[in-house]
Amino acid sequence: MTIEEKKARLLRLSEKVTEEWLKEQMDYCIQKIEQNMDRFGTKFPSACATNGRYRIKENDDWTNGFWTGMLWLAYEWTGKEKFLIIAMENIQSFKERLDTHFVLDHHDIGFLYSLSAGAGYKVTMNDLCREEMLAAADVLLARYQERGSFIQAWGKYGDPKEYRLIIDSLINLPLLFEATDLSGNTCYREAALKHYQTVLQTVIREDATTYHTYYFDPETGNPSYGATHQGHSDNSIWARGQSWAILGIPLNQNFLPTPIPENYGAIVDVFIEHLPEDLVPYWDFDFNDQNPSDKDSSALAIAICGLLEASINQAYPQAKLLAQGMIYQLGEYYSTKDMENNEGLLLHGVYAHAEGKGIDEPNLWGDYFYLQALMCLLNPNWTRYL
């Protein structure tokens, strides 16, 4: 199929997305979260499932905010106090993690705290959540590298082997923009803006495809080279990386007076053009229906949220309708609604293919972004956490 044929098919599928269909999807998701909450208690699920079940862990991974974000969504949708109680227990856990700087030597502070304390503040206006957001923003700001104008992705600050950023970082920046709004201190916004501009100039290639990660010279800060960590090769298109760009660019533009970058439409086109027959991407675009591999449903869930964000600013033609067509495919063919013993919301995700991690399994970010997309479609006035 050509890209135009794929868009036409998505637009036809979008006609099947009724309010009744969306509510059915949301209801099954909330029921699943409620069941999982009873098992997880005040602890956290692992980043990805094994045979459809999440391991129960302490608050020690970059993905824990996705679980707390789902609890906040469940509370907002149902009004059930039990979701609020566990979400606030999680908030205390995240505070303790900040106090001890436990497994926080990475840039995913936004994933952790925008979806926990940030969401909690938007829902409850609780002062603890506000203070936690600002403290988390300080941790993220401390990773900003003046030489190169970027936030270091992983490892100890200044480690020359880790002098790089990754495409995922776009989703962490709203924490900094919001910290300026809350505190009046412009240093957060300034760092976020500089990092955003650096991402646009480096990790996004001239042909609107994306590297996973981009290195800089630690001595001069000059851009060095693009590479991958989770993609098929340094020069391939990692599907989830492309979807992070689809979401991350309009997400950050919400805080800026400037128009959306001119290549945004081309970035979306690359994603849609590489979708296979069933419109759910393989984990890397080196693969297709003639040369198949494992699917990554989470990449599509992220892209759906990105298109819904883009539709607000009219950044891509028919973005909302295309997103509806995509979510229909996930809800009809990739959801766990008829699988009582599977704890995920979406089947057929991939965490890290090269490491053999979370292949053909649910994962927390896929679950979260699917739930967020449902909420956005059911309630266009809903205040987003990210």
Image: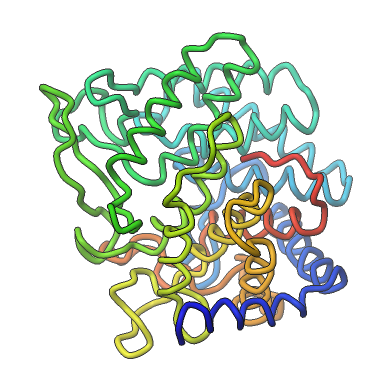
Tell me residue 134's x, y (percent): 57, 17
Tally the marks: 0
Q: Please say if 156 is above or below 321.
A: above
Which image quadrant for residue 359?
bottom left
Q: Please say if 304 is above or below 42.
A: below
Which image quadrant for residue 12?
bottom right
**Which residue is at 63% across, 16% downward?**
131
Give the farthest residue toward the left. Answer: 219
Tell me residue 329's x, y (percent): 62, 78
Q: Is residue 82 left or right of residue 302?
A: right
**Which residue is at 20% across, 51% downward?**
227
Give the farthest residue toward the bottom. Answer: 290
**Which residue is at 69% across, 35% downward?**
119
Q: Is residue 129 left or right of residue 358?
A: right
Which image quadrant for residue 161?
top left
Q: Please say if 154 is above or below 157.
A: below
Q: Is residue 4 left or right of residue 183?
A: left
Q: Please say if 142 is above or below 208.
A: above
How are the residues colored? rainbow
Task: Report if residue 217 is visible in the image.
Answer: yes
Residue placed most toward the observer, 101 or 164: 164
Tell me residue 91's x, y (percent): 65, 30
Q: Is residue 62 left or right of residue 337?
A: left
Task: Report if residue 341 is visible in the image.
Answer: no
Residue placed most toward the observer, 347 or 194: 194
**Which residue is at 25% across, 65% downward?**
236
Residue placed most toward the observer, 201 or 174: 201
Tell me residue 201's x, y (percent): 31, 39
